[in-house]
Image (cartoon, rainbow, N blue to C red):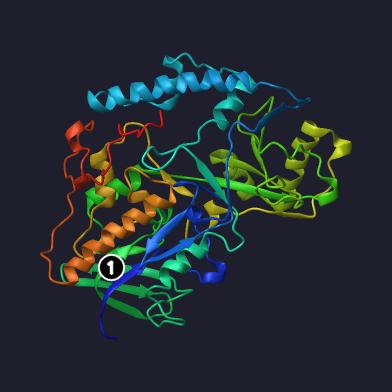
């Protein structure tokens, strides 16, 4: 098989377009908006995901096990503490101080929920991140085509229908690399040779040892991979008979404070409201981490009954019918994902993250996990892929080969000077553009 100049693998199993599901590209995704439009300019063509609506985080009703209970005043108290936490984080960055957890930061700011269920629920709710470089708004995309339409639109600018260069439903088993090129072994016994390759396996896949590398990745690279964590974030969708909708659809969000367990089916979002899918009878609940692992490990029926118990506590057993549809993904069990998105443990330095990003010989790495500023988000994966793709395009056209910086010796903190483009840091976190 003749060598190809570049091979990009997004996961050990490359799904076809009808079955593509990536955590950062999931239908029902919160995205940053630019003047209320989510788009990408390419070749003078503007492609939009038009079915989206503004997420109004002030449109919320709160509940506990007895029904509706207004504890929205706690949201303002939490916001004040979080603002103090953000300010302290700036001091830690600029003065090169020892890192601390969000929990300790909130406690120092005066927020200590203890065993109070409502305060715990407020924490679970009010962790939505916005990026000052774009907008102070989030839009919820519910386009029926899914976020997959975005990928297909971009791919259509350089791939033909049934393009032989795109291998679908193809499982990668081994990657061999050296200073001359990269070889990819496939489960069916075939092998692909390339001058360069971009590996965009999820962090969960890299940590799973599903794929072997020859030679074994260097110690500094393995340390970068194993230091970070893979988060799990699960949206569970229910559809009820449209003529039996029992919640107040004028609210976008519902927040539930369970009396016994923090994070037990806490955050609900109605899609049966103005601007979304009125008359659909659809609502979904989000769980993360330990609760995600629990629901992803159990069968649908068990999860459905647990959720219905919560809803009947919130709205009364006599008001909640059986759903006519029920579904949720299992990100932590998917062999091409093993989780939803990456996360930084407390105390992790930018040097350590750069070791996760850096290339080894002609094998490069990209994806949301390699984005130092936007890890866990769609645009993080986009920017990283764009940057690495541009680098390799330059090499193919004759540019001198340069090795991305990595660190054999790691330091305990990140100095302000290290927040630079060589370490993947392109925009100052202190630029707020008037959004604060």
What is the quadrant of the N terminus in the image? bottom left
Whether residue 367 is visible here, answered yes or no, is: no
Q: How many marks?
A: 1
Looking at the image, residue 292 sits to the left or right of residue 281; the answer is: left
The answer to which quarter of the image holds residue 84 is top left
**Considering the numbered disc 1 on the image, is that residue within a helix, a strand or a loop?**
strand
Front residue (pair 234, 12): 234
Q: Residue at image x 26%, y 85%? A: 2
Residue toward you, 184 or 315: 315
Task: Please determine whether, in this image, residue 318 is positioned above or below residue 324.
Answer: above
The image position of residue 141, as x and y in percent, is 56, 52
Residue displayed at 25% across by 47% down: 424
| Residue placed furthest toward the right | 318
Query: Residue 180 sits in which quadrant?
Result: bottom left
Decide: is 101 above or below 155.
above
| Residue at x-position 62% and y-position 49% | 297
Residue 390, x across and y down, in percent: 25, 62
Q: Quadrant of residue 343?
A: top left
The quarter of the image holding the C terminus is top left
Query: Residue farthest to the bottom?
Result: 1
Residue 69 seen in this snapshot: yes
Q: Position of residue 356 (x, y in %)?
A: 29, 49
Pointer 1 local density, CA inside 10 Å: few below 14, some 14–19, many at least 20: many
Up-down relation of residue 119 to residue 283 (above or below):
above
Q: From the viewer's perspective, tell me whether residue 203 is left or right of residue 117.
A: left
* Residue 419 on image: x %, y %: 22, 38
- Please give the residue where the numbered disc 1 appears in the rendered image: 197
């Amino acid at each position: 098989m003749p060598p190809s100049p570049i091979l990009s693998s997004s996961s050990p199993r490359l799904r076809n377009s009808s079955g593509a599901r990536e955590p950062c590209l999931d239908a029902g995704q919160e995205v940053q908006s630019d003047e209320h439009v989510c788009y990408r300019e390419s070749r003078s063509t503007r492609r939009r995901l038009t079915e989206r609506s503004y997420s109004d985080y002030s449109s919320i009703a709160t509940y506990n096990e007895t029904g509706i209970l207004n504890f929205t005043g706690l949201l303002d108290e939490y916001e004040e503490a979080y603002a103090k936490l953000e300010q302290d984080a700036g001091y830690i960055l600029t003065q090169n101080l020892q890192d601390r957890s969000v929990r300790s930061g909130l406690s120092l700011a005066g927020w200590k929920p203890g065993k109070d269920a409502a305060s715990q629920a407020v924490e679970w709710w009010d962790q939505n991140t916005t990026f000052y470089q774009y907008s102070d708004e989030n839009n919820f995309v519910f386009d029926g085509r899914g976020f997959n339409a975005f990928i297909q639109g971009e791919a259509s600018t350089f791939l033909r229908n049934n393009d032989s260069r795109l291998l679908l439903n193809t499982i990668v088993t081994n990657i061999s690399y050296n200073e001359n090129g990269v070889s990819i072994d496939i489960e069916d016994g075939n092998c692909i040779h390339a001058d360069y390759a971009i590996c965009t396996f999820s962090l969960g896949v890299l940590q799973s040892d599903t794929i072997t590398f020859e030679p074994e990745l260097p110690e500094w690279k393995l340390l970068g991979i194993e230091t970070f964590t893979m988060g799990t974030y699960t949206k569970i969708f229910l559809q009820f008979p449209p003529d039996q909708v029992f919640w107040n659809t004028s609210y976008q969000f519902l927040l539930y404070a369970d009396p016994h367990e923090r994070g037990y089916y806490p955050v609900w979002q109605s899609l049966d409201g103005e601007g979304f899918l009125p008359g659909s009878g659809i609502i979904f609940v989000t769980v993360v981490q330990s609760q995600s692992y629990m629901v992803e490990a159990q069968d649908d029926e068990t999860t459905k009954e647990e959720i219905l118990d919560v809803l009947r506590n919130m709205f009364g057993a006599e008001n909640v019918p059986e759903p006519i549809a029920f579904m949720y993904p299992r990100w932590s069990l998917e062999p091409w994902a093993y989780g939803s998105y990456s996360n930084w443990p407390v105390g992790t330095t930018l040097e350590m993250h750069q070791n996760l990003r850096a290339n080894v010989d002609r094998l490069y790495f990209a994806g949301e996990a390699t984005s130092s500023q936007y890890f866990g988000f769609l645009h993080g994966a986009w920017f990283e892929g764009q940057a690495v793709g541009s680098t390799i395009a330059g090499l193919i056209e004759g540019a001198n080969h340069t090795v991305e910086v990595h660190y054999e010796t790691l330091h305990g903190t990140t100095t302000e000077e290290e927040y630079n483009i060589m370490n993947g840091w392109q925009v100052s976190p202190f630029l707020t553009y008037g959004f604060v």
